[in-house]
């Protein structure tokens, strides 16, 4: 049985209140939990009974934010109002995020997040409750387990939980639990990984638990998970991966928070053109979004004029991006408009996070070489690392552009090496000249001084790079260009199979 976002059950407004106001846990600096409601029809996932030993699977695309990011972040979103346009994407023709889980006969909690690391087994409740540190192994998986209620474990150590051990919880809630999570993207990619994975994990656990849920349940429960992990964040990442294609999402000023998301219908021809003109380049630098989030929230709290104006600009550009997509047939310059918006968006991210084009340094070099070919570009997500999303001009072939830029960067690197060699030669000459002016009296010490200088210079000059370091450098360069993003038209998919039907390595 398979559920996707094309499997829609429209719910009336009187059916939308599902107790979500109790699902939000305030993070540091928030004295109370904002009420959360919704104003749109939802996708509903019907409850089914999953036999023990049978896997529940989920797969989800990544997202590229095109305009308005940061206005979705709490408390900015309910103090200023938020509006974001983003697009769900497959990477290398595959949904990059996948999850599977099943209940087992053995009373073991087994969590796996990396195919190269053996699954981790947990036995005490406190081992599950350390999810408040996002750097703890399996922190995201643990937070989702607690938030889903599948094991009856709460986040608070002092709560009166009837279970003393994980084995007790497993015994009374349906057996052991195996949870496997995979991502084909690097950590800190800026593509919404943690939030989208959280939504996919919650969907799998809810299905395994035999509970009905809606798309909005997943969106808001993901907010809860992020607060449990003390990473904060907003709502645009999970919206971007759970729902397919291009979307515009808004949140009005004030409480309760009212999130409204609409899919923007675009033609197949537009999608094909967008795919052909979209470049995804990995910068090789990762950054935890939490670190940038703290900087941005501090700047917002100070209500600096430049910061407030930037938030206004972000919202206005999201509206411009929405209109360009809505009227793509009537808008001859739709791609140049979207490209310009992406470029302004990137500048706004840098202002808010106190970063520059040198964060990371490769970005400035890339943009310099790409400048003749691009309509616009932005680092995905919070910025400061991860993937660079580039929209090309119509007359340029993507593969030709990649080859041109790779060639230009290789030539640039050779020139840098030549400069280093010249510097070394100048340094040797300078040190040799010093030895010549030493007054020795009999000439013997002068010769020794020269010899010593030459030896010292030789030892201080950089050695030739080893073959292994050259191979690593080549692999790093190649990893920049091995990614291809295409618009995803499916969104989150949840299905039930058997242990021989696997979608993950």
Image: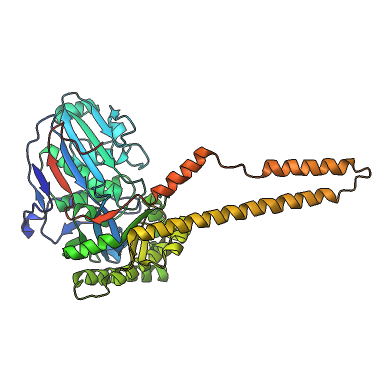
In the displayed structure image, the side of residue 264 where residue 283 appears, left or right: right
In the displayed structure image, the side of residue 434 where residue 380 appears, left or right: left
Residue plotted at (83% across, 40% down): 448
Q: Vertical placement of 139 versus 323: above or below?
A: above
Residue 63 figure quarter? bottom left
Residue plotted at (28% across, 69% down): 335
Residue positioned most to the top: 106
Asked if residue 256 shows in the view, the reply is no
Asked if residue 409 shows in the view, the reply is yes
Residue plotted at (41% across, 63% down): 370
Image quadrant in which the C terminus is located: top left
Residue plotted at (18% across, 61% down): 261
Q: Nearer the viewer, residue 97 or 415?
A: 415
* Residue 142 percent across, percent down from the top left: 27, 38
The type of colouring in the image is rainbow
Q: Nearer the viewer, residue 75 or 73?
A: 73
* Residue 444 percent across, percent down from the top left: 89, 40
Image quadrant in which the N terminus is located: top left
* Residue 471 percent across, percent down from the top left: 47, 41
């Amino acid at each position: 049985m398979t559920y996707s976002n094309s499997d829609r059950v429209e719910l009336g407004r009187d059916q939308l209140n599902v107790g979500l106001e109790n699902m939000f846990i305030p993070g540091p600096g928030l004295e109370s939990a904002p009420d959360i409601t919704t104003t749109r029809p939802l996708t509903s996932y019907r409850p089914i009974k999953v036999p023990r030993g049978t896997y529940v699977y989920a797969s989800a695309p990544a997202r590229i934010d095109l305009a308005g990011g940061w206005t979705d972040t709490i408390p900015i979103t309910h103090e200023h109002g938020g509006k974001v346009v983003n697009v769900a994407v497959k990477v290398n023709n595959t949904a990059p995020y996948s999850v599977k889980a099943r209940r087992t006969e053995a009373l073991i909690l087994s969590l796996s997040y990396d195919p190269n690391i053996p699954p981790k087994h947990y036995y005490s409740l406190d081992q599950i409750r350390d999810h408040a540190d996002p750097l703890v192994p399996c922190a995201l998986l643990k937070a989702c387990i607690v938030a889903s209620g599948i094991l009856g474990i709460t986040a608070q150590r002092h709560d009166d939980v009837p279970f003393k051990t994980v084995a007790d919880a497993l015994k009374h809630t349906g057996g052991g639990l195996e949870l496997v999570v995979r991502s084909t993207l690097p950590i800190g990619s800026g593509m919404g990984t943690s939030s989208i994975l959280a939504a996919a994990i919650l969907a799998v656990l809810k299905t395994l638990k035999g509970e009905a849920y809606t798309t909005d349940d997943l969106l808001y429960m993901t907010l809860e998970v992020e607060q449990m992990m003390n990473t904060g964040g907003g709502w645009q990442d999970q919206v971007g991966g759970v729902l397919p294609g291009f979307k515009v999402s808004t949140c009005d000023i004030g409480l309760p928070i009212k999130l409204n998301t609409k899919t923007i219908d675009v033609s197949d021809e537009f999608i094909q053109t967008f795919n052909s003109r979209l470049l995804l380049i990995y910068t090789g630098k990762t950054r935890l979004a939490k670190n940038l989030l703290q900087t941005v929230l501090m700047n917002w709290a100070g209500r600096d004029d430049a910061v407030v104006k930037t938030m206004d600009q972000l919202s206005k550009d999201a509206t411009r991006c929405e209109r360009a997509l809505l009227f793509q047939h009537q808008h001859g310059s739709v791609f140049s408009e979207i490209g310009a918006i992406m470029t302004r968006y990137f500048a706004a991210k840098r202002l808010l996070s106190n970063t520059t084009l040198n964060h990371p340094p490769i970005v400035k070099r890339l943009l310099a070489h790409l400048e003749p070919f691009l309509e616009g570009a932005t680092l995905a997500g919070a910025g400061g690392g991860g993937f660079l999303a580039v929209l090309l001009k119509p007359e340029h072939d993507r593969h030709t552009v990649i080859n041109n830029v790779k060639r230009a960067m290789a030539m640039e690197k050779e020139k840098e090496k030549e400069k280093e060699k010249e510097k070394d030669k100048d340094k040797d000459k300078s040190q040799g000249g010093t030895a010549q002016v030493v007054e020795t009296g009999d000439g013997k010490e002068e010769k020794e001084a020269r010899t010593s200088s030459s030896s010292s210079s030789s030892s201080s000059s950089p050695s030739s790079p080893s073959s292994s370091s050259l191979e690593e450098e080549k692999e790093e360069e190649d990893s920049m260009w091995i990614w291809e993003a295409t618009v995803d038209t499916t969104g989150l998919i949840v299905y039930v199979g058997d242990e021989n039907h696997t979608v993950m390595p």
